[in-house]
Amino acid sequence: MEKIKMKTPLVEMDGDEMTRVLWKWIKEILIEPFVELKTEYYDLGLPYRDQTDDKVTVLSAEATKKYGVAVKCATITPNAQRVTEYNLKKMYKSPNGTIRAALDGTVFRAPILLDGITPYIPTWTKPIVIARHAYGDIYKAVDGKAGKGKAELVFTNEKGEKEVKTIHEFGDNGVVMAMHNTDKSIASFARACFNYALDMRLPLWFSTKDTISKVYDGNFKEIFSTIYENEYKEKFEKAGIEYMYTLIDDVVARIVRSEGGIVWACKNYDGDVMSDMVATAYGSLAMMTSVLVSPDGVYEYEAAHGTVTRHYYKYVKGEETSTNPVATIFAWTGALKKRGELDELPELTAFGEKLEKATIETIESGYMTGDLVGLFKKDGVTPVKLNSRDFLTKIAERI
């Protein structure tokens, strides 16, 4: 069988721990036997990020802008414990945050649904897509410790005039943080959400907490409202879908009672948290697709979960693991399909679709990783737990 040839490379961002192991196996077992894989490789594993003072992350983002499509493995965002564990020079920022800031895109996360796995919320019969703003807020915040004294927020305009607001007068030790966003980025986020909802023919709900954060969150609300009224209202009405703004706690209550079939637009931190909640409620964090879409049409595909540290240390000890690779497989298929679409290679796009179908059919036929066994219920099918590599091999048999 002749391998499918690629015209333009994908930007390949390798990662950490168990997902790094799965990354290699996915290429070896599911992709390279069928595709003459062409990638520009960047090692975003924590040791190499430390070695390059995290410059490799910036380079990978620049390459993504150049080539238009990237696929990323899960990576570690180090805390104090990780700094010690990996003997790092410093506590580096989230590589996802760096890449998202560079691309100024929106992250769309959707569950992978299949026959045999019922969500923990059984009314969720349709996908809930989380649209997460991918710039600013807490991920670009400046924070620090405070002692006895006054913390102030100072803005100096282009004329040199200063506006000073007191944050807090500390009588003892504490902490302080300042974060930001831009109207341009918020507007890009809004248009991405409106366009995605129209493409998918799904209603769009946007939520913040503008009753508390009257200026900051209020600005998000106002920009969304203005763009909707001026650019999208007629399109939404023609498509028969709605746009709704409400408080985030109200959306949480509504979502739990819904059947799904909604695009839920969230600010950066809200989207980070809620996408994990939604993914888990649908069955598993490893069954969630994630794509970052920039305003100028750049795509970065990744798994929506972490590096599976506990399984990695079992693997290092030589113990068998049953880590779910589905989200990482779908990151690769998403990138391959988009590359095929942009390069007019229908056979590459078709391969991505075929690999996705083979993955879903393998699980629906009863072969899966351990995290899904307790969730799987299908008449006439007894679930079989496979280790990570055997599961990938089982998928390959169906391609």
Image (tube, rainbow, N blue to C red):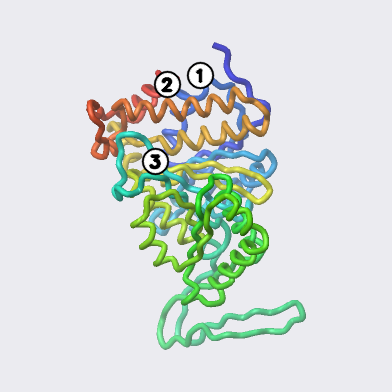
Q: Secondary structure at mark 3?
A: loop
Graded by Cα atoms within 10 Å as few (under 14), some (14 to 19) or many (20 or more), the crowding at tag 1 reads some
Q: Name the residue beneath numbered marker 1.
A: 33
Of all residues, the one furthest to the top in this rendering is 1
Q: Which mark is residue 287?
A: 3
Label 2, residues with CA under 10 Å away: few <14, some 14-19, many ≥20: some
How far apart marks 1 and 2 lie (CA) works out to 9 Å
Q: Amino acid at mark 1?
A: Pro
Disc 2: which residue:
396
Residue closer to the observer: 190 or 273:
190
Residue sitting farthest toward the right: 159
Q: Secondary structure at mark 2?
A: helix
Indicate the position of residue 66 as horizontal and vertical percent values.
Answer: 70, 41
Q: Residue at x 53, y 36 (%)?
A: 334
Which amino acid type is shown beneath numbered disc 2?
Ala
Residues marked 3 and 2 touching at CB (< 8 Å)? no
**Residue 272's image quarter?**
bottom left
Residue nearer the viewer, 180 or 255: 255
Task: Look at the image and tell me whether residue 152 can be seen.
Answer: yes
